[in-house]
Amino acid sequence: MSNSNNETTKLEFLLTLSGNIIVQRFFNVRGYNPKVRKSLDLYKNVKKISEIIEQDLKEKTLEYLHENQHYFPLFDPNNNEGPDTEEYFLLEIKQNDDVFISRVIPAHIFHPKVRYSVDIRPFLRGFLGGLSETFSSTELETNYLGYNLLKNEN
């Protein structure tokens, strides 16, 4: 199932927080290479995206804490009131309902005001452009620790 350079394949970029959609974008890839799904290139690209999101959340948390440094929340350990339960962002790249790759980012380590108002729109165009470029690439890194990742592919 290979596509010529004129055909496009529709893929989906999805970022959720505890099952709630934060960002969902569909993007087209010209010259889609299905072998990319099992390459290190895709892994590295998605890892880089998650690191950028984490760094942005970290910076916004620090800014928020600096701006609100004189605010002290009331916390009584006897009532078990306090920090939220663990929450996670889930980043998925998929085609229809088939998830190629997913990555979990801990959300509970960031301030609630920051994690519930996450905004990756300034980065989105770069993320989708990089993913499109990766998915249409023909020069792939497919060996990991001496193991061929495409070995069982027909």
Image: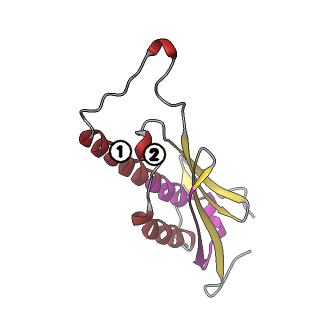
Q: Residues within 10 Å of mark 2 (few under 14, many from 20)?
A: many
| Secondary structure at numbered mark 2 | helix
* 79 is higher (above) or lower (below) than 89: above
Residue 24: percent from left, percent from top = 58, 63
- Three-letter amino acid code of the residue under disc 2: Arg
Stretch of the chain drawn in magenta: 22-49
Task: Tell me residue 60's x, y (percent).
Answer: 33, 48
Q: Residue at x 48, y 36 (%)?
A: 108
Which disc is residue 115 wearing? 2
The x and y percentages for residue 99 are 68, 57
Queried whether the magenta region covers residue 70, the answer comes back as no
Is mark 2 in CB contact (under 8 Å) with mark 1? Answer: no
* Residue lying at 61% horizontally and 54% vertically, measured from the top left: 101
Amino acid on which the number 1 mark rests in the picture: Lys
Query: Which one is closest to the eye, mark 2 or mark 1?
Result: 2
Q: Which residue is mark 1?
A: 58
Nearer to the camera, 80 or 118? 80
User: Which comes before the other along the chain, label 2 or label 1?
Assistant: 1
Q: Quadrant of residue 77?
A: top left
- Quarter of the image with the C terminus is bottom right
Q: For the residue carrying disc 1, how many other residues have a C-alpha within 10 Å: few (<14), some (14-19), or many (20+)?
A: some
Above or below, 49 against 85 in this view is below
